[in-house]
């Protein structure tokens, strides 16, 4: 299993349930990386998508405590642990945690790698964060692409490996 995320300079990922940046190149990278695989997310992440609909061409597993919640085309589970059980038969190299902060916190330690879009900007109003992998001893940077510039922002794609998995 892997994680994919876009962060600012302070490892912030969101504000009031929304992404911090709109970068078409990052969205394209996300789509190319996750299409054909399984994505695991929290309910609020799903609700932030256009039309509040699951992502096409991917198996969507949504963690929600709301037994009344309905998302056609998604597999609903009550906990992060249940999400892992639901994805157990899927190719682990094609399983992606995609947010939000609660899901990353619960499952990141079990990820083999993290693909991080690092945006060279800060969002002072952010209220959701991803762990700073540069400061965690079990994670190491193994690849970097960029920098790229788009919409007045500079960003890089950085891949980290979890030394404690696999």
Image: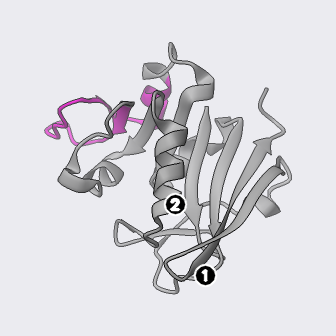
What whole-number distance in Å separates the C-alpha atoms at marks 1 and 2? Answer: 16 Å
In the image, residue 36 lies at what x, y percent?
A: 46, 27
Residue most toward the top?
Answer: 89
Mark 1 surroundings within 10 Å by alpha-carbon count, few (fewer than 14), some (14 through 19), many (20 or more): some
Instruction: Check disc 2 and report its element: helix, strand or loop.
Output: helix
In the image, residue 8 lies at what x, y percent?
A: 60, 73
Residue to which mark 1 is pinned: 121
In the image, residue 128 lies at what x, y percent?
A: 48, 68
**Between 66 and 15, the one nearer to me in the picture:** 15
Residue most toward the bottom?
Answer: 124
Horizontal side, residue 93 vs residue 152: left or right: right
Q: Which residues are magenta?
A: 60-84
Residue 59's image quarter? top left
Which residue is depicted at the point 34% across and 37% down? 62
Q: Is residue 103 above or below residue 135?
A: above
Tag on residue 25? 2
Decide which of tag 1 and tag 2 comes sooner along the chain: 2
Name the quarter where the N terminus is drawn: top right
Q: Is residue 134 magenta?
A: no
Mark 2 surroundings within 10 Å by alpha-carbon count, few (fewer than 14), some (14 through 19), many (20 or more): some
Number of numbered labels in the structure image: 2
Q: Is residue 64 magenta?
A: yes
**Disc 1 versus disc 2: nearer the observer:** 2
């Amino acid at each position: 299993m892997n994680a994919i995320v876009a962060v600012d300079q302070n490892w912030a990922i969101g504000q009031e349930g929304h992404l911090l940046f709109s970068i078409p190149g990052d969205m394209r990278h996300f789509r190319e990386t996750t299409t054909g695989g399984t994505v695991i997310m929290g309910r609020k992440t799903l609700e932030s998508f256009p039309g509040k609909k699951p992502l096409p061409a991917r198996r969507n597993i949504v963690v929600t405590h709301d037994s009344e919640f309905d998302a056609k085309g998604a597999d609903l589970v009550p906990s992060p642990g249940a999400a892992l059980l639901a994805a157990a038969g899927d190719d682990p190299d094609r399983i992606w945690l995609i947010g939000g902060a609660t899901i990353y916190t619960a499952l990141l330690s079990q990820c083999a790698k993290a693909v991080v879009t690092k945006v060279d900007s800060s969002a002072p109003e952010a209220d959701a964060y991803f762990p700073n992998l540069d400061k965690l001893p079990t994670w190491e940077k193994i690849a970097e692409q960029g920098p790229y510039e788009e919409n007045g922002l500079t960003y890089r794609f950085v891949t980290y490996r979890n030394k404690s998995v696999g």
